[in-house]
Image: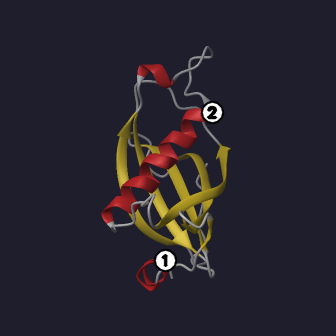
Amino acid sequence: MKIEIPDHKKLVHEMRLETRWGDMDAMGHVNNAVYFRYMESVRVAWMASVGCAPDPKGQGPVIVNAFCNFYRQIEYPAELRLRFYVSDPGRTTFESWVTMERVDQPGVTAAAGGATVIWVDFPAQKAASLPDWLRRLVA
């Protein structure tokens, strides 16, 4: 199954990731919870690449929800291509999206998901406005 990402979502990062033996469950395929780790890996890699690491004494990104749709099983061993998209910047949030496919099955989406990211002032424990530089990257 090929999933189309709507035009208003912007591809900002792509990476490859190897599945690990320990990612599998008793059914012999990657456990559903691990897909969220894969999405986290590409999201954190993009954030690091743009200087968007959280600062516990300042501000940074936090996800407030996450979802994943599973289309095809992934088994070990496999090399995955993860694509990370962003869209819809708001005052304090933006949307993020991830597609996952096996490198040996290009164009076949195994899973797709995403998360809403909120910008937080950690000492104040409340939402803060997205920095202008981040808003420009996401828009």
**Whole-percent x and y of residue 127?**
62, 71
Name the front one of labels 1 and 2. 1
For marks 1 and 2 on the same chain, the one whose residue lies earlier in the sequence: 2
Taking the spot 33% from the left edge, 67% from the top edge, the residue there is 51
**Whole-percent x and y of residue 84?**
47, 60
| Residue 25 against residue 67 in the figure, above or below | above
Amino acid on which the number 1 mark rests in the picture: Val
**Whole-percent x and y of residue 139?**
51, 82
In the image, which disc is placed on residue 29? Answer: none
**On the picture, is 67 further left or further right than 99?**
right
**On the picture, is 81 further left or further right than 64?**
left
Amino acid on which the number 2 mark rests in the picture: Asn
Pointer 2 local density, CA inside 10 Å: few below 14, some 14–19, many at least 20: some
Mark 1 → mark 2, Cα distance in angstroms: 28 Å
Taking the spot 61% from the left edge, 76% from the top edge, the residue there is 92
| Residue 41 against residue 4 in the figure, above or below | above
Outermost residue to the top = 26
| Residue 101 against residue 87 in the figure, above or below | above
Q: How many numbered marks appear?
A: 2
**Whole-percent x and y of residue 5?**
58, 66
Pointer 1 local density, CA inside 10 Å: few below 14, some 14–19, many at least 20: many
- For label 1, the residue is 138
Taking the spot 44% from the left edge, 60% from the top edge, the residue there is 54
- For label 2, the residue is 32
